[in-house]
Image (spheres, grey):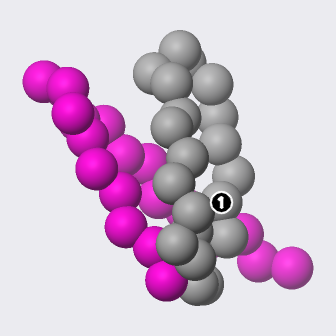
Protein backbone atom coordinates (compact mmCIF):
# COMPACT_ATOMS: atom_id res chain seq x y z
CA UNK A 1 0.00 0.00 0.00
CA UNK A 2 1.27 3.44 -0.87
CA UNK A 3 4.72 2.23 -2.02
CA UNK A 4 5.16 -0.22 0.90
CA UNK A 5 5.63 -3.93 0.17
CA UNK A 6 4.14 -6.47 2.56
CA UNK A 7 4.34 -10.25 2.28
CA UNK A 8 1.16 -11.98 3.49
CA UNK A 9 1.89 -15.68 4.09
CA UNK A 10 -0.57 -18.27 2.78
CA UNK A 11 -1.24 -19.67 6.25
CA UNK A 12 -5.04 -19.49 6.28
CA UNK A 13 -5.14 -16.13 8.06
CA UNK A 14 -7.55 -13.31 7.22
CA UNK A 15 -6.14 -9.87 6.42
CA UNK A 16 -8.04 -6.57 6.41
CA UNK A 17 -6.56 -3.94 4.11
CA UNK A 18 -7.70 -0.43 3.26
CA UNK A 19 -7.53 -0.47 -0.54
CA UNK A 20 -8.64 3.12 -1.09
CA UNK A 21 -4.99 4.11 -1.64
CA UNK A 22 -2.69 3.08 -4.51
CA UNK A 23 -2.19 -0.68 -4.37
CA UNK A 24 -1.54 -3.85 -6.32
CA UNK A 25 -1.43 -7.57 -5.50
CA UNK A 26 0.68 -10.42 -6.85
CA UNK A 27 0.30 -14.18 -6.45
CA UNK A 28 3.36 -16.35 -6.92
CA UNK A 29 1.73 -19.74 -6.38
CA UNK A 30 -0.35 -22.12 -8.46
CA UNK A 31 -3.60 -21.56 -6.55
CA UNK A 32 -5.23 -18.14 -6.59
CA UNK A 33 -8.20 -17.47 -4.35
CA UNK A 34 -9.42 -13.95 -3.62
CA UNK A 35 -12.40 -12.95 -1.53
CA UNK A 36 -13.13 -9.25 -1.85
CA UNK A 37 -15.77 -7.63 0.36
CA UNK A 38 -16.78 -4.11 1.29
CA UNK A 39 -17.45 -3.23 4.94
CA UNK A 40 -20.13 -0.62 5.42
CA UNK A 41 -19.88 1.63 8.45
On the image, the x and y values in percent for residue 4 come to: 57, 63
Quarter of the image for the C terminus: give it.
bottom right
Tell me which secondary structure the magenta stretch mostly adopts.
Answer: loop
Q: Is residue 17 left or right of residue 19?
A: right
Q: What residue range appears in magenta?
A: 22-41
On the image, the x and y values in percent for residue 23 come to: 45, 73
In the image, residue 11 sits, relative to residue 14, either above or below, namely above
Identified at 69% across, 52% down, the residue is 16
Identified at 36% across, 46% down, the residue is 34
Quarter of the image for the N terminus: give it.
bottom right
> Which residue lies most toward the left here?
30
Quickly name the residue at label 1.
17
In the image, residue 21 sits, relative to residue 1, either above or below, namely below
Identified at 64% across, 34% down, the residue is 14
In-front residue for pair 9/12: 9
> Which residue lies most toward the bottom here?
21
On whether residue 21 falls in the magenta region, the answer is no
Q: Is residue 35 left or right of residue 8?
A: left
On the image, the x and y values in percent for residue 31 come to: 19, 26
In-front residue for pair 1/12: 1
Amino acid sequence: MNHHVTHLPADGSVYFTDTRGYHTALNGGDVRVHLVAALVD
